[in-house]
Image: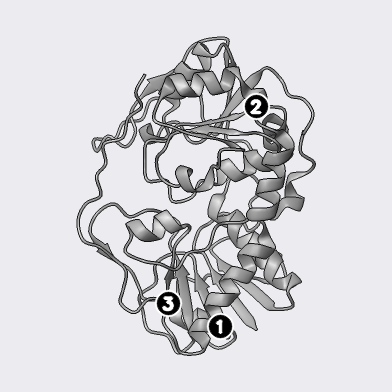
Amino acid sequence: MKILHVLLTRMPVPPLKYGGTERVVWALYKGQKELGHEVKFLTKHQSSHPDALLYNPKNTLEEQVEGWADIIHFHFLYEGELRTPFICTTHNQQVTPASFPKNTVFLGKLHAERSGGKAYVYNGLYWDDYGEPNLTHSGNYIHFLANAKYKDKNLKDSVEVARKAKKSLHIIGSKRYCLKWRKNGKYKPYFYPGNDLNFYGMLGGDKKNEVIRNSQALIFPVLNYEAFGLAMIESLYLGCPVIGSNCGSLPEIITRDVGISTDSKSVMVDALNNIGQFSRERCHDYARETFNHLIMSRNYLYYYKQVLNGHALHDEPPAIAQNLLYDFSLKD
């Protein structure tokens, strides 16, 4: 099968530093190649990779994707007309009324249900890029992995929980302060002083993986409809349990043997004070076995074949009829 992945971002595939969806596309590329298929990817990033195609803004998207592939996999919601069969994955949770193309794939069962759909594939990653996990010991710190300027990533409660548990907090993907302001409240200025907080900013590759693998746990108290959360499976693979909220995908992804999903900060503190209850080896095995590039690739191939046989993934376009309730918070 000839497969073309389309992701119109300017970040490289594979990403050199931060890049979530780019890592997923790379994992799909690696997995589907291993399974014997011809695979290419189209992005806006200039790349010397032999299977990378560069998007040309002078030509229509349709002109650039037609002609080679048996199936096209868009990593955004594409609603145009093509001769070539296609599917699209939505990597975010829409929270306002919306409809989706019939051949949309979501990132989990809850993500699909909230969006009026049923077809979903869990994200997987190419674990060879992550090195060896740390399954025997860790430093006396926990980590936060997100861009803290977004209020719903909830660095505020992460700091509070870490301090109550007397844990140093290593913060990946964020700076100590942010002076930007957005009127819609999505992010606002912040400043976090304290020697118990270590800020790394945007961090990727071996340096990022080193911080994670030597951490006791990921603190992930998001207050949004997280569609999936790659930070969770990256941390699990490297040996870290996940201590998080019960929002978004967490109740589905985080099982009781690899972490907790709760709306209580005191429960999070207690879990961190008894972090030895979670097996680092079990966390690693769970991520490796459940969220890897080959399983994800095979699951998408199932949907590709369905579309190639003339069957839509949904009988009717999935739809969200009204605004999703969006009033998340943690209790003490």
In the rendered structure, which amino acid carries the disc numbered 2? Gln
Residue under the point 76% across and 38% down = 133
Residue at the spot of label 1: 305
Numbered disc in front, either 2 or 3: 2
Q: Position of residue 131 (x, y in %)?
A: 78, 43
Residue at the spot of label 3: 313
Q: Residues within 10 Å of mark 2 (few under 14, many from 20)?
A: few
Badge 1 marks a residue whose secondary structure is helix
In the rendered structure, which amino acid carries the disc numbered 1? Lys
Residue under the point 43% across and 62% down = 90
Choose between 87 and 14: the one closer to the eye. 87
Q: Sequence-wise, which precedes: disc 2 or disc 3?
A: 2
**On the image, which quarter does residue 4 sit in?**
bottom right
Choose between 182 and 132: the one closer to the eye. 132
Q: Residues within 10 Å of mark 1 (few under 14, many from 20)?
A: few
Mark 1–mark 2 Cα distance, whole angstroms, equals 43 Å
| Left or right position of 217 against 161 | right
Residue at the spot of label 2: 277
Q: How many labels were placed on the picture?
A: 3
In the rendered structure, which amino acid carries the disc numbered 3? Leu
Q: Position of residue 62 (x, y in %)?
A: 44, 81
